[in-house]
Image (cartoon, rainbow, N blue to C red):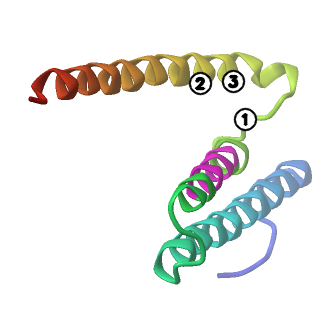
Amino acid sequence: MSNRIPADMPPGEYEDEGRERLSYMIGLALALALTTAAFAVVWLDLLSGGAALAALGGLALIQAVVHLRYFLHIDLQRSHRDDLLLILFTVLILIIMVSGTIWILYDQHIRMMP
């Protein structure tokens, strides 16, 4: 693979491609580090009980932000706010569905106890 600029590509577009590739590499490094940290917390028993769950939840939230920023290129710029609002709405719907399911299952669990 050569590092030469293609003759038909304008210099500005080539620089944008390089910045995008760098963004992907930073995102990959952060995602791998966060995944490794999550596995280390569980495998090495660094934390136990609620602290481990809180740490894993925090790592998962940071991982989601890394994916949104570096892979989906969604940030707080005005041109990307519509995408961000769509994702936030989707997250809201998922939270409602998951919490409702947990609530119903817990209620059924309580009703099944002798």
Q: Position of residue 57 (x, y in %)?
A: 58, 50
Label 2, secondary structure: give it. helix
Q: Residue at x 90, y 49 (%)?
A: 12
Residue, disc 1:
74
* Residue 85, numbered label: none
Residue at mark 2 to residue at mark 3: CA–CA distance: 5 Å
**Callout 2–callout 1 Cβ contact below 8 Å:** yes
Q: Quadrant of residue 6?
A: bottom right
- Magenta residues span 56-65
What is the three-letter code of the residue carrying label 3? Leu
Tell me the SS state at disc 1.
loop
Residue at (76, 24) in percent of width and height: 80
Q: Percent x, y for residue 35? A: 56, 67
Asked if residue 7 shows in the view, the reply is: no
Q: Nearer the viewer, residue 63 or 5?
A: 63
Quadrant of residue 82 within the rendered picture: top right
